[in-house]
Amino acid sequence: MFPPRRPTGGDAPIRSTDNDAAVARVSAVKKGYCEDPFINHFVPRAHFLPPRPPLINIGTYVRSAGIDILVNQWLSMASQSSQRCQIVSLGAGSDTRFWRIAAHSAGPSKEHLEVYVEMDFPEITTKKAMAIRKSKELVQGLGDPADVMLAQGGTALHSPRYHLLPVDLRLDPSETLEPALCNSSNPDVSAILNPSLPTLVLFECVLVYMSSSSSLRLLEWFVNLSKRSENGVLGCVIYEMFGLGDAFGRVMIENLKERNISLPGAELFPTIASVPIRFLDAGFSAGRALTLKEIRKNYISAEELERQNIQFGILG
Ligand SMILES: C[S@@+](CC[C@H](N)C(=O)[O-])C[C@H]1O[C@@H](n2cnc3c(N)ncnc32)[C@H](O)[C@@H]1O
């Protein structure tokens, strides 16, 4: 049976940002900034796409590398405390991080991953589920193909460790995330998330498309989930725009307006100092924000910067 359809036609411009992110990644990979053997599976005719300008490729690289560092730290922390952890990526789009972790044979990574969940609008999850089913390589990354199952009319996909689920993140999480991830109302079916395992929540370029009250409600739901267990530990990574009041930001807002995309989630964050406050407001004990420039300067290895300098002539 198909789930009831919500009127989501007006969200097509927001959903189209998934293609922007995926095409930027294809470009950064093609030009040698990033490594990602899986992204082409999610982008039709990826080989024919023209590359993006160097500045976009560098931004895509630093964004991806910065989040990779935090995700790998989370997996390493789980390994050091002999625990298994959970990762939930909201507005995941065509992200390939799960497969990159699963393919990583060295290090603690995948052995310490209990579950990886991705959520997005049903149109996006349907497309992703179909791309996964079509690719032997992607299915293999999920384990035994016999354990990979489509659900909810093809909008969801389940495997022992990876789950792809449809959701509109603007709706009340007690009515969306709660039944999808915790299954509290059905004791016969085990829940996808276990509140006693360390949980990392990823929002990569997502919250900016919704009101700050909706995103606060989402963050609070995860904080409350972690409190259901005495041992609950929660981490959260948000990659987002802020400070759009300058000339650059205003031009970007105007360009996006032409595509019917607005950025209500950026309104409350005029400066970098305003960004971590959202974590404290939601009940996290600490929060920190860095710019891409700071990440590039302080967290990308000297060897990688040297490689980019030689290969692409990027200085500084
Ligand atoms: C810019 S893309 C980023 C995709 C991915 N996180 C990445 O960085 O490659 C934004 C994603 O958020 C999703 N999204 C935005 N608002 C959403 C909502 N209310 N509910 C579910 N998904 C949403 C879009 O469909 C899209 O896939």
Image (spheres, helix red, strand yellow):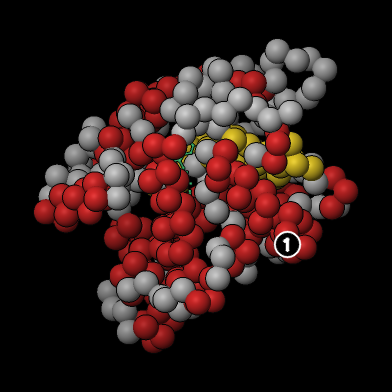
Instruction: Examine the rendering and report whether any part of residue 96 can be seen.
Output: yes
At 50% from the left edge and 42% from the top edge, which residue is drawn?
91
- Percent across and percent down for residue 293 are 29, 60
The response on whether ligand 1 sits within 8 Å of label 1 is no
At 60% from the left edge and 50% from the top edge, which residue is drawn?
127
- Percent across and percent down for residue 98 are 64, 52
Rendered view: 147 above or below 58: above
Rendered view: 115 above or below 212: below
Mark 1: which secondary structure? loop
At 43% from the left edge and 28% from the top edge, which residue is drawn?
170
Rendered view: 178 above or below 107: above
Q: Nearer the viewer, residue 202 or 198?
A: 202
Quadrant of the rendered image containing residue 83:
top right
Q: In the visual, does 9 lie left or right of 108?
A: left
Residue at the extreme bottom of the image, as rendered: 310
Query: What type is the residue that disc 1 sits on?
Result: Ser
Quadrant of the rendered image containing residue 50:
bottom left
> Which residue is disc 1 drawn over?
135
- Percent across and percent down for residue 27 are 45, 71
